């Protein structure tokens, strides 16, 4: 079969011939129809994701999720340890979820990770309440764009989108953000922009796909000097680290602001029935055009060409 293959962490995967994987105990083989190149796949292949240890499982077929056909013909989204960027992948049946007729395989596969994670981060992790003010820090990526739409759909009162690419930010405004701001402004200007964009009420929820310096500037704006009880709970959820893997966190920020810092990742995945319910709703919203994601269908043979490319808000999906 054809597969994208990685022989060393940090390399670019290339399309090669490999034997068809052997299904493990209780697993089934899926004929893959669509495998998105998500940020997690690139980070795992680079060896920088916390789920990968040096030298583990090489050669590796990247891809943790995909769409495909089960032996009985059912179209499913599925998770795989054998790697989804191949003609065939193995999966446990409880990691398979039906795709409705009205949703295309590539769209469903592209949306699954970014949309479900954004949705669950807002609802399960941050506990978003109707009317609250949400900041999406790093809103120009595929996940940030879905987070903006999800926040809007879930009843946020005000949605602020922050990113560095003016062209992409304009597109994010069209997806429902009430305000946008540029994170590569000088620190005092960025700090003022964070405060201004909150619309006078402050942020209740921050989904942070950037971390690093933009987050440090945001945190500096949260310090309250008045010693008055504000009773505000600012739930900042650490989701990604596109702008840096570390921040400096002054003690006064936590003591004076009501800030609560959480993370979204493997350790905070909600119970499976919550995730399945969110996935069903997301697929329905995609079918109705309420949620939008841009995809670029790319033949599997061209994996090396598109692997490291700036995706500019449009997810490449490999088609075997
Ligand atoms: N924890 C979770 O549940 C979860 C789920 C999904 C994604 N994530 C993480 O979230 C992050 C984004 O994922 P994605 O799917 O949106 O990726 P993506 O589609 O590749 O987008 C990445 C975005 O980051 C922006 N960016 C890169 N460096 C930046 C910087 N220094 N300052 C500001 N913006 C910068 C890029 O903007 P430009 O257009 O300016 O290049 C691009 O829009 C990744 O770290 C990913 O691993 C986490």
Image (cartoon, helix red, strand yellow):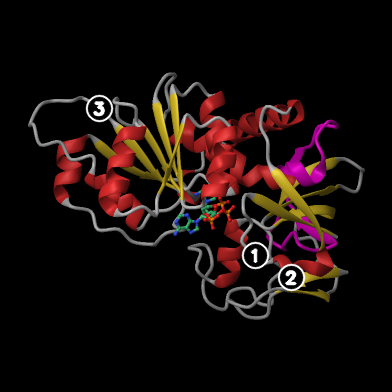
Residues packed near mark 2 inside 10 Å, few (<14), some (14 to 19) or many (20 plus)? few
The C terminus sits in image quarter: bottom right
Residues packed near mark 3 inside 10 Å, few (<14), some (14 to 19) or many (20 plus)? few
Q: How many numbered marks have been drawn onto this rendered protein structure?
A: 3
Q: Which residues are magenta?
A: 80-108
Q: Quadrant of residue 256?
A: top left
- Asked whether disc 2 touches disc 3, contact meaning CB atoms under 8 Å apart, the reply is no
Residue ID for mark 3: 232
Does residue 263 appear left or right of residue 82 in this picture?
left
Residue ID for mark 1: 309
- Asked whether disc 2 touches disc 1, contact meaning CB atoms under 8 Å apart, the reply is yes
Residue at 44% over, 57% down = 241
- Measured from the top left, where is residue 229 in percent x and y? 13, 25
Does residue 65 appear left or right of residue 2 in this picture?
left
- Measured from the top left, where is residue 150 in percent x and y? 56, 31
Does residue 233 appear left or right of residue 269 in this picture?
left
SS type, badge 2: helix
Q: Is residue 8 above or below residue 193?
A: below
Q: Quadrant of residue 11?
A: bottom right
Asked whether residue 19 appears in the rendered view, the answer is yes
Residues packed near mark 1 inside 10 Å, few (<14), some (14 to 19) or many (20 plus)? few
SS type, badge 3: loop
Residue 84 colored magenta? yes
Residue 33 colored magenta? no
Residue ID for mark 2: 305
What's the CA distance linking mark 2 and mark 3?
Answer: 48 Å
């Amino acid at each position: 079969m054809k597969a994208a293959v990685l022989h060393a962490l940090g390399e670019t995967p290339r399309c090669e011939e490999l034997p068809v994987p052997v299904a493990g105990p209780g697993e089934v083989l899926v004929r893959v129809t669509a495998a998105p190149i998500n940020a997690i796949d690139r980070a795992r292949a680079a060896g920088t994701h916390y789920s990968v240890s040096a030298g583990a499982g090489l050669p590796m077929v990247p891809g943790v999720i995909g769409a495909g056909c089960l032996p009985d013909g059912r179209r499913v989204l599925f998770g795989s340890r054998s790697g989804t960027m191949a003609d065939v992948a193995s999966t446990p049946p409880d990691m398979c979820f039906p795709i409705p007729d009205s949703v295309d395989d590539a769209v469903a596969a592209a949306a699954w990770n970014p949309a479900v994670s954004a949705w669950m981060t807002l609802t399960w992790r941050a506990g978003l309440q109707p009317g609250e003010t949400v900041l999406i820090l790093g809103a120009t990526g595929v996940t940030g764009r879905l987070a903006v739409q999800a926040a809007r759909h879930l009843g946020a009162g005000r949605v602020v989108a922050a990113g560095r690419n003016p062209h992409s930010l304009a597109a994010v405004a069209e997806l429902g953000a009430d305000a946008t701001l540029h994170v590569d402004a000088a620190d005092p200007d960025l700090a003022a922009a964070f405060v201004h964009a909150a619309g006078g009420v402050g942020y209740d929820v921050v989904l942070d796909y950037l971390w690093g310096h933009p987050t440090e500037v945001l945190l500096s704006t949260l310090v309250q000097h008045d010693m008055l009880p504000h009773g505000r709970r600012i739930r900042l959820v650490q989701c990604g680290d596109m702008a840096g893997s570390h921040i400096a966190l002054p003690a006064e920020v936590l003591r004076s602001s009501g800030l609560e810092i959480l993370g979204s990742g493997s350790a905070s995945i909600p119970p499976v029935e919550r995730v399945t319910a969110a996935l069903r709703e997301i697929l329905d919203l995609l079918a109705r055009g309420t949620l939008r994601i841009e995809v670029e269908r790319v033949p599997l043979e061209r994996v090396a060409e598109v692997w490291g490319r700036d995706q500019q808000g449009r997810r490449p999906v490999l088609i075997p």
